[in-house]
Structures are given as structure tokens and as C-alpha cells.
DNA sequence: CGGATGTGATAATACGCATCATCAGGAGGA
DNA sequence: TCCTCCTGATGATGCGTATTATCACATCCG
């Protein structure tokens, strides 16, 4: 049965069986009729039938090399795509990307971030160049490598970033979320509840998303005339806030806690509860981030990042670039959705 | 702006600058010295320096084309890959697949469904096997389409199924899990706890995984001499068991409930609790399936399917097929891990 | 009947790299 | 001197596809 040695069929095979040239096969397959090239319906039919009977599919590699396209969009994550703990981070994006790609008839290539045999970690050297196999690429990741992006852009490769990035020289397409405005909304909510002394716990390591939140917070703070002395404590996401940090902020008079990371916010909630302080009756807690699905704990006051929509939109932008054959650096920013949650309430007047 | 102008350097560019041939460059870059090919250190140095100064990186596309393979493994799911509710079903497999693919330097193509107007998913779009884009493919899914599989095999396409499948004519590679043995273990556990009247709730629609569990159950039942009259109720996964079903089984004397699907088991647990029957003091409940991560509820007595390992192993088998250039239908069956859980306990003697 | 026009293709080539077979030239041996 | 062996390379070719330029043949018109 099944001759194991059977190679993938090539255009040449089809050509032989259909009694035409490889050129003709290529022309038929790609629907390349023009003024100078004409294929009569009968020949076309014959070629298509043979192609089908052989199960022919163009070799994406050869096609790329020859300058063609593959209806293949790449997805590259700067961290591992399916890590055990992050998975709820990427998953919503992938849902959006897959749905949109499918709707538009594209398949997806997930590029694994191969670390080189020489042990070299340079993502670019080993990973990114393979991206060329795809017609274009959606880049995901918190720790996007700036140099890689610049280089990709300068190579004229088509891609769309998910997440705003300040790239020197600009000219990079991205889909972002409006963290600044969403942050303002959360602060407004807290202020409306009577909180005027808000502890602020930003990410320790700055990044664009973090900067946007800072900008939003500063705007809202200024607008409401809130004080900040002794109320700002940068926190490392993984290490989390120390109990002493929380105590210090309480001493400083904080009645509400606002953290960049939902994980941090939940940790604060836990610490407050340990200290015997009721949330939200005694203190409010809010995050500038939505907790991943399935994480236990109270429903946080926060905002929802429209990840699925961002993924879908990134595909849209990308495919537009690909099909229009011009690499314009379109950028889109989507709004986040405020979530009132159950961890914020009116300021405790008895204090 | 985007300075699209500067082309990537090619081996020919290096060759010109170093005063050697393109062949020599290729040989140096790839460290291809052999008996018949020798490059003196001084030439080698020169070439490497020029290459470095130009920032040369081999074009993976061209490299693939010359090598005959594109280092691309396909992943095809017969259901949508990233559905909102199933995601915990596929995710562990993908984790394993990605990890192994990355380790072996392969990228993954996720084929989007191209769901036909009839709702049915097929590998064949317009009668063309799109999967051929990859060097080979891992096929996932509960509702595998037999016809597609037979056709793929007869085409000589390389693929590995995850999940045992009885395909007429055989010759199909798969990675399975030993549901039969795992089922026996669960039954043994229940019997050891004193249960002799066990209600059995298999899947309503038969499939290989379901058959395997049936086989295991039958074997264990026979071995222990358990009765079955009035104790077997097929259940549809989505519809779930009716309250009357559970009551009927209780009337029949059941002291333990064994369901194929963890969802069903959890539902039974809920019904029993509603009826005021304590689990596991009054009744035991077990599943032949592990609940997805993040599903709330008690820790079920069940067994864990080694999904991650299955994914990884599937990639191994596939790549072995690809690289050895022979399509042998290797099949592997992995053991499942018994989970004692908290929903089973000694039979209530007071009954 | 000769030239113009139109039709249905195809040969040649490029894409960038890997590899096989071959070669020039010098050293060494008989 | 002629032959062999070794060193240091290189020319040619293939991988599968896309594209451009060209061609053979028929038909139509004057």
C-alpha cells in the first residue's frame, strides 16, 4: 500500500500529466491570465483536475522564495506561546487572531522562538528571519525586543504589533488599548466614591503600557487635586507588595489602593483582609488590568482589556498591508471596559 | 518612510568582497568541511569577517528550499482551535506540541478550520489538502473525520493522530492514552472501598475513547463479579444526566457513580448534594476523565490524561516519520495517572 | 498571397542557498 | 620526467515556483 516514498506533487508533475508546461500550471493555479497570457477554459480545466487528483498544494517555501504569497499569517510571541502560567495572557489574543484569520481564509504559523544551537539568545538571528515564510506577522509579547522590531521594519517586512510601542523613527503599525483613559476612569470612580487619598502601586519596571497608566493617573490626579506624597510604591509583579508596604500606605492615610497589576491588587486585598480590614467597607482596591480567567478571588474593580478584539484587529491591519501591497504604519487604539467590581465602595467616613 | 532600499546581504555579496566563490561562503558559514572540502583558516577568517561586517543572516526560505523540507509541522484540530469554552481541552496538548517542536527547531502551522457552509470541518478545501503546506501534521480532535484520515493516509501524507483511532485498513500512527487500564484502576479503587453496586454512565455517542473505557469497565466488572442490571445509563455530555436518572440509579441500589465525562460526574455530584446525600459519605462519584483546569467544584476521583506528554510524543513520532522518510504507522499508548480525589470514600455500611 | 492580428502556449530565468563533482597547481615519489 | 597525492578551492546544478519575453500557428484582411 501507500508507496512511502511518494514525494509531494510539484507543478512539473501536473504539467507532465496534463500535457502542458510548468509555466502553464503556475499560471492556471494562480489565476494569472492577462493581456499577454491566455489559457482556454478547456486547458484550465484539465490542469485543475490533475492538480486536484494529485492533491497538489504549492510549496510555501518555494513560493516565498519566488516572491509569491501563501495566505499564511505569522504569529510571533516574544515569550513562549503556551507557557503554563501565562496561558491566559495570550489565549484571548489568539482567539481573536484565529477567528479573524479563519474568516479571511488565512492559516496561521506559530513561530517557535528557537534559541540557536550556538546558545546565542538573539531572537533575531535564529527566530525572526523565519518569519519571512509568512506573508506578514502579528507580534505579541510584553517584552518586545526593540532592536528586532527596528530591523524588521527596515527590512520592509510586514507586521503589526499588539500593544503600543514607541519605536525610534516610527513607521510601525500597532493595535493598542487606551490604558490612559481607562486609568482615568478607574480613578474617577474611586474619587466619586469619596476617596481622596489613593495609594498608587505602579509596575517597578517601566514599559509603554506602564507609562500610559502613569500618564492617565497623573492626569486624573491633577484634575482632582489629589496628594501623592508617600503614596506611591513601585511593585515588582512577581515579588508582589510587602505587608510592610501596605501598612506604610495605610499609615500615610490611604483609603484606596490602585495597582497596575491585578495580581498585585489581589495580593493587597489578601493582606488587608489578614490585617482585619474589610474590603470594600474599610478600604477599596482597584487594578489597572483585568485578572486572567479562572484566577480565584474577589471580582476586582478594574478595566477589561479588549484582547480578543485587539487580536482580530491586528489581523485586519496586517492583511490590509499585505493585500494593498503597501506598508503603511496604521495604528489603532481600542477602548477598555470599566469593571465596577466588588472591591471598591464609598469611603469609610468613620475614619 | 521605511527605508526599504537596503537589500539583505546574500552569500554572493560576501563572496565578492572576500574574493571567493559563493560556494566557499556557503561552506564556511555552514562549517561544511569534509574529506573532499577543505578551507584554510585564513580564508575562513576572511569570509567570516566580511559576513559579520555585513550582518549576514542566511535566508531561511532559500535554505529550506535547498534542503527539501520547510521545518514546519502542521497542527489541525477537527474543532475550532481556540474556542472559548474548550480551550482548556486543547491547551495542554498545544503546550506539549509547542515545546517539542521548538526543541527540535520546527515551527507550527495552525490550520484554521475553513468550516464549510454545512458546518462540517474538513481538511480538504476545494478538494485540496491544505495540510500539505507542512512537512507533516498532528491531528487533534474528538470528532475526527474518518474519511479525511483515510484519504490523507492514502495520499501518503505524513501525520500522527492524538487519540487512538480504528481506521479501516490500518496504517495510521497515533498517540493514545490507556483509558481501559485507567478505568480498571478507578473501578478497583471503588471496589476496594467496598462498593459493589456501581452506576455506570458512559457517553451516549460511542467513539474509540468511549469504547476503551467500556472495555476497561467490563473487564473490571467481570473480574469483580459486579452486577449491572438497571445500573447503566448513557448520558449526553452537553445535556447532562437528569435528576430522575440519578434517583433511578439510587433506587437500583447504586452506592457509587462512575461517569465517562467529568462534567457529568460533577453534575451528578451536584444533584446528589441537592438531594441531601453527602458525598463521599453516603455516595461516591468518579469520572473517567480529568476536569479542565479552573473548573470549580470538588476534586474528583478520576484519572489524569497525560495530554502534554501526548502532544510532545506526537511531534516526536511525526518528526521521526519526516526525517526517516518512511511512513511507518508507529503507535504509542501512554498510561494515565489515577487521582484519588475527595469524591469517593468507603461504602456507607448503614444502608 | 503577404502581412497584420490574435491565440495558446512555452523557454528561460530569477529567487538564495547547498552540494556534488571537478579542477588547477604544487609537492613528493619512482 | 611522469605519475600520484594532496590542498584549496570552484562551476554547475537542483530545490519548486513566479514572471517575462518570446514563439508557433492560425485567422483575417486587403
Image (spheres, coloured by chain):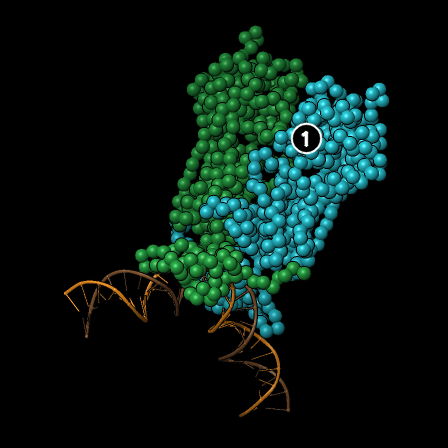
Chain colours: A cyan, B green, C orange, D brown
Report the front residue among A208 and B191. A208
Q: Residue A298, can we see it?
A: yes
Between D25 and B263, the residue placed more toward the observer is B263
Q: Position of residue A248 (x, y in %)?
A: 73, 25
| B8 shown above or below A174 | below
- Judged from this view, the residue extending furthest toward the top is B350
Task: Say which residue appears at 42% left-offset and 65% top-offset.
Answer: B20
Q: Residue at x 55, y 25 (%)?
A: B287
Q: Is residue A79 left or right of residue C11?
A: right
The residue that label 1 is drawn on is A264
Rendering coords of residue B288 (x, y %): 53, 26
Q: Position of residue A285 (x, y in %)?
A: 75, 28
Local crowd at mark 1 within 10 Å, few (<14), some, or many (≥20)?
many
Disc 1 secondary structure class: helix
Q: Is residue B152 visible?
A: no
In the displayed structure, does residue B328 sit left or right of residue A156?
left
Q: B336 or C30, which lies in front?
A: C30
Residue in the picture at 67% in, 42% down: A207
Q: Chain of mark 1?
A: A
B2 lies above or below B134: below
Give percent across and percent down for residue D20: 56, 72
Q: Hey, which quadrant is residue B258 in on the image?
A: top right
Amino acid at each position: 500500500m501507500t508507496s512511502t516514498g511518494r514525494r509531494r506533487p510539484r507543478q512539473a508533475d501536473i504539467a507532465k500529466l496534463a500535457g502542458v508546461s510548468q509555466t502553464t500550471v503556475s499560471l492556471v493555479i494562480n489565476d494569472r491570465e492577462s493581456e499577454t497570457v491566455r489559457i482556454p477554459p478547456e486547458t484550465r480545466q484539465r490542469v485543475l483536475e490533475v492538480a486536484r487528483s494529485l492533491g497538489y498544494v504549492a510549496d510555501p517555501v518555494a513560493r516565498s522564495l519566488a516572491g509569491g504569497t501563501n495566505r499564511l499569517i505569522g504569529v510571533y510571541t516574544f515569550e513562549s506561546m503556551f507557557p503554563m502560567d501565562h496561558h491566559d495572557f495570550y489565549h484571548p489574543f489568539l482567539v481573536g487572531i484565529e477567528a479573524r484569520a479563519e474568516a479571511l481564509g488565512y492559516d496561521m504559523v506559530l513561530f517557535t522562538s528557537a534559541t540557536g544551537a550556538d546558545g546565542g539568545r538573539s531572537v533575531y538571528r535564529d527566530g525572526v528571519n523565519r518569519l519571512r515564510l509568512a506573508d506578514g506577522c502579528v507580534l505579541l509579547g510584553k517584552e518586545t525586543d526593540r532592536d528586532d522590531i527596528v530591523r524588521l521594519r527596515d527590512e520592509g517586512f510586514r507586521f503589526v504589533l499588539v500593544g503600543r510601542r514607541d519605536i525610534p523613527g516610527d513607521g510601525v503599525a500597532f493595535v493598542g488599548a487606551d490604558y490612559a483613559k481607562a486609568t482615568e476612569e478607574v480613578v474617577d470612580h474611586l474619587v466619586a466614591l469619596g476617596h481622596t487619598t489613593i495609594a498608587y502601586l505602579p509596575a517597578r519596571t517601566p514599559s509603554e503600557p506602564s507609562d500610559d497608566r502613569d500618564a492617565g493617573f497623573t492626569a486624573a490626579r491633577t484634575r482632582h487635586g489629589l496628594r501623592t506624597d508617600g503614596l506611591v510604591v513601585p511593585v515588582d509583579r512577581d515579588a508582589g507588595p510587602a505587608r510592610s508596604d501596605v501598612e506604610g500606605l495605610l499609615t500615610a492615610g490611604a483609603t484606596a489602593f490602585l495597582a497596575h497589576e491585578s495580581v498585585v491588587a489581589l495580593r493587597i486585598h489578601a493582606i488587608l483582609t489578614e490585617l482585619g480590614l474589610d474590603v470594600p467597607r474599610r478600604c477599596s482596591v482597584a487594578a489597572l488590568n483585568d485578572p486572567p480567567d479562572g484566577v480565584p478571588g474577589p471580582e476586582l474593580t478594574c478595566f477589561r482589556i479588549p484582547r480578543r478584539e485587539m487580536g482580530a484587529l491586528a489581523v485586519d491591519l496586517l492583511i490590509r498591508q499585505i493585500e494593498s501591497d503597501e506598508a503603511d504604519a496604521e495604528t489603532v487604539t481600542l477602548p477598555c471596559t470599566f469593571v465596577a467590581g466588588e472591591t471598591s465602595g464609598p469611603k469609610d467616613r468613620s475614619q
